[in-house]
Image (cartoon, rainbow, N blue to C red):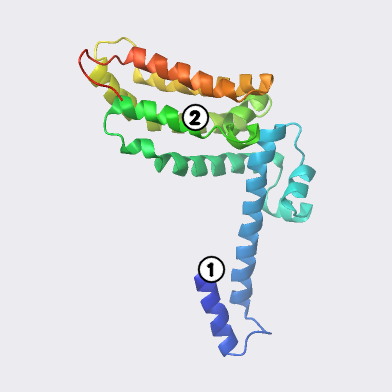
């Protein structure tokens, strides 16, 4: 897109339009600046909502942190709830791409792939709480009763991630625990309960190590549910 715009600008220069850009050129540049502003607000929203929570964050806070005017903010978002909904969608797209490209997908054995997924989750626990905790979990704790549209959006995002785990868990169960009574759906959900719960307790006790410890316990539980046959080597 940037290369295309540079080409357009060069073309305008050759035709003497540097000082009198045509309407279509002005519109393209304005659209690009508008998208950059919207992106900046969403990037800030991801951090501020995770850091302060929804109720404690105002539109003024988002404007100040992103360096935009309230006029620019309301040009893109009708309200704080609107920017939260957009931030949830933005979060889902960003994290969806992150997990889709994660190295655990290269592990062929489904049991080992599930354990590698948990290792990957542990690797993401770096920096301040607002840098590694989940936007969806943070928001829904506050808004599940007061803002049903946000609750529904958070639930959809969490379920979207759950669905990415199901094929791996189903394959692992079929291979390692075909007679077990538990379901792949319940284990996928349990992994998220442990992760989201560990974020909450880690914040309460101001100790990120709790997340790492919880993931290690979860890995041991997965190994218990998916026992390796005697004589077979594990990683």
**Taking the image as drawn, is residue 84 in sight?**
yes
Along the viewing direction, whichever of 64 and 25 lies nearer the viewer: 64
In-front residue for pair 228/1: 228
Q: Tell which circle, 1 or 2, labels the residue nearer the N-terminal end.
A: 1
Report the side of 51 relative to 136 (left or right): right
| x and y, in percent, of residue 133 in the image | 59, 31
Residue behind mark 2: 122
What residue sits 55% from the left and 82% below the top?
Answer: 10
- Left or right of 179? Residue 212 is right
The C terminus sits in image quarter: top left
In front of the other: label 1 or label 2? 2
Q: Is residue 205 above or below residue 129?
A: above
Q: Residue 198 falls in which quadrant of the image?
A: top right
- Using the image, tell me which numbered label, if any, was put on residue 73: none
- Disc 1, SS: helix
The percent coordinates of residue 53 (x first, y second) are 70, 31
Q: Is residue 148 visible?
A: no
127 sits left or right of 223 in the view: right
Residue at left offset 40%, top offset 43%: 101
Is residue 204 positioned above or below 17 on the image? above
Task: Report, in whole angstroms, how far the alpha carbon at label 1 lies from the one at label 2.
Answer: 36 Å
Q: Quadrant of residue 209?
A: top right
Image coordinates for residue 195, horizontal then vertical, percent: 52, 23
Residue in the image at 31% along x and 38% along y: 106
Q: Quadrant of residue 221?
A: top left
Q: Image check: 58 left or right of 217? A: right
Residue where numbered disc 1 is placed: 2
Query: Looking at the image, do the residues carrying marks 1 and 2 touch, with CB atoms under 8 Å apart?
Result: no
Residue at left 58%, top 84%?
A: 12
Against 95, residue 23 (above or below) is below
Total marks shown come to: 2
């Amino acid at each position: 897109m940037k290369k295309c715009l540079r080409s357009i600008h060069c073309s305008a220069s050759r035709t003497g339009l540097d000082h009198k850009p045509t309407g279509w050129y002005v519109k393209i540049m304005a659209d690009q600046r508008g998208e950059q502003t919207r992106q900046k607000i969403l990037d800030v929203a991801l951090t501020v909502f995770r850091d302060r929570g929804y109720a404690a964050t105002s539109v003024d806070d988002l404007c100040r942190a992103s360096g935009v005017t309230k006029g620019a903010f309301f040009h893109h978002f009708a309200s704080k709830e609107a920017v939260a909904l957009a931030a949830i969608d933005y979060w889902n797209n960003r994290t969806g791409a992150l997990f889709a490209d994660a190295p655990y997908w290269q592990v062929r054995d489904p049991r080992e792939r599930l354990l590698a997924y948990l290792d990957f989750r542990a690797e993401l626990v770096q920096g301040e709480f607002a840098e590694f905790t989940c936007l969806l979990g943070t928001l829904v704790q506050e808004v599940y009763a007061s803002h049903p549209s946000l609750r529904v959006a958070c639930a959809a995002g969490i379920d979207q991630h759950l669905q990415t785990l199901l094929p791996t868990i189903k394959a692992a169960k079929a291979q390692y625990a075909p007679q077990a009574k538990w379901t792949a759906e319940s284990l996928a959900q349990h992994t998220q309960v442990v992760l989201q719960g560990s974020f909450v307790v880690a914040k309460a006790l101001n100790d990120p190590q709790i997340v790492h410890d919880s993931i290690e316990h979860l890995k041991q539980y997965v190994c218990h549910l998916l026992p390796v046959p005697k004589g077979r080597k594990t990683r």
